[in-house]
Amino acid sequence: MPFNGEKQCVGEDQPSDSDSSRFSESMASLSDYECSRQSFTSDSSSKSSSPASTSPPRIVTFDEVMAAARNLADMTLAHEIAVNENFQLKQDALPENSLARRVKHIVHQAFWDVLESELNAEPPEYEHAIKLFEEIREILLSFLTPGGNRLRNQICEVLDTDLIRQQAEHSAVDIQGLANYVISTMGKLCAPVRDDDIRELKSTGNIVEVLRQIFHVLDLMKMDMVNFTIRSLRPHLQRQLVDYERTKFQEILEETPSALDQTTEWIKESVNEELLSLSETALTPGAENNSKPSLRPTLVLNNSYLKLLQWDYQKKELPETLMTDGARLQELTEKLNQLKLIACLSLITNSIVGAVTEGLPDLANRLKRVSAVLLEGMNKGTFNLKEVLNSIGVQTCAEVNKTLMERGLPTLNTEVQANLLGQFSSIEEEDNPIRSLIGGSSCFCWYLPQNRFALICWL
């Protein structure tokens, strides 16, 4: 298959735009993102009517809910491909020692055992082998672009099942020769990363094992082709993502009217908070009251996104328009919480031992790295913050004393170390003044993706 900077298919062109478009639609079925449908289906049987409305609530059918879920899966997959440069599909691997894995192994082994017995019989039975070559032919042809070309015609001629059956009837079929042709063709179509697999196929002597490994390598090549097509589609999706998601959200709303209730509530909360803030500012003594305060959309939008940095993912659902970025937002929130604690620890360390460690930037950086490592996974349920803070305190005292000793300075006395450990442990308390200070006054930059801005304004 053609790869940028890799081997080109013999006699093949690059995949056309129409093929890529058809692929992007079919790929939606491979996605496992339909788990997000709960947000759209919950309480979606009816849409709350306003007090002034006399019309009965519209009943949403199961088919409409499923159509909305499919639209969500399509949009989620397209969004992930566009924003995640490392996105790729992988073959499903059944868990080790699982019942499904054992059953699959037994069934496959039984099939290949039967095939081996048929080929070793007198006279040999070739029907199952011919069917395998027919399937191999279709897979090889799927790697090629539509249209007539030399390689396509050659594959069809060599792997002509009708001809192979006629040869089998006269005991003139060369199974090993057909397998060698398939391996040679795979070598022309595969990416360089599969060259070792092709060489291994050529060195395999048992014909049944060769056929078995051919199908294994073909599965890998199919994944290579899929991921290559994804990389080819990414620039196109990035250009069209805003309009595509806008259209998909509109389709979801038409199928499920209550599909964006969480997003609406999220925006309303920010609007109310900004209105309250503007009112308090207007009533402040000395404030200029000549002009009426105005609520700017950008201000509301910025506040809405900043609220996500303090989002409780265990108790609150994300706005529907942000579900595709849920994992990234949660990771950002966890990183922010970690940075807040590191800032608290640095402030305490500087206030207690800053006088003796002044002018030692390497020590400060080392202490931050130690804190960051020990605070990894702090948002997990099994994380014990009190124990970790105590460990950070002990490690901080050890690092400071080590640095002081290297410079021939007196180490920290017991009272100072006990004070440092106590201050670190107190950060666990929610009402800790240092924690409140860092959490309330820290300013963090927030990157606002263009497509999100468009979606929110559309609401």
Image: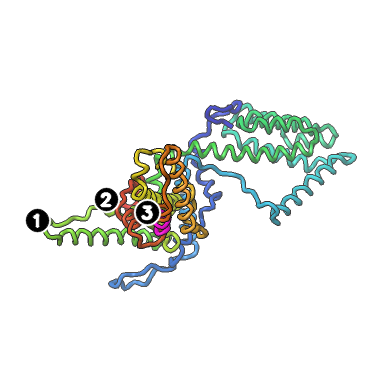
Residue in the image at 15% along x and 60% along y: 284
| Quadrant the C terminus occupies | bottom left
The amino acid type found where label 2 is placed reads Thr
The amino acid type found where label 1 is placed reads Asn
Where does label 2 land, which residue? 298
Query: The residue tagged with tag 3: helix, strand or loop?
Result: helix
Indicate the quadrant where residue 213 lies.
top right
- For this orientation, the residue located farthest to the right is 122
Q: Is residue 318 visible?
A: no
The stretch drawn in magenta includes residue 446 = no
Where does label 3 land, which residue? 309
How crowded pointer 1 is (Cα within 10 Å; few <14, some 14-19, many 20+) is rated as: few
- Counting from the top left corner in percent of width and height, residue 438 is at 33, 53
Residue in the image at 37% along x and 42% along y: 357
Where does label 1 land, which residue? 290
The amino acid type found where label 3 is placed reads Leu
- Counting from the top left corner in percent of width and height, residue 178 is at 75, 32
Q: CA distance from mark 2 to mark 3?
A: 17 Å
Residue in the image at 44% along x and 46% along y: 79
- Counting from the top left corner in percent of width and height, residue 349 is at 38, 49
- How many numbered discs, if any? 3
Q: Compare residues 223 and 280 and report the one nearer the observer.
A: 280
Residue in the image at 77% along x and 35% along y: 164
Range of magenta residues? 420-426
Query: The residue tagged with tag 1: helix, strand or loop?
Result: loop
- Tags 1 and 2 in contact by the CB under 8 Å rule? no
Q: Compare residues 78 and 58 and report the one nearer the observer.
A: 78
| Quadrant the N terminus occupies | top right
Q: CA distance from mark 1 to mark 2?
A: 23 Å
Q: CA distance from mark 1 to mark 3?
A: 35 Å
- Tags 1 and 3 in contact by the CB under 8 Å rule? no
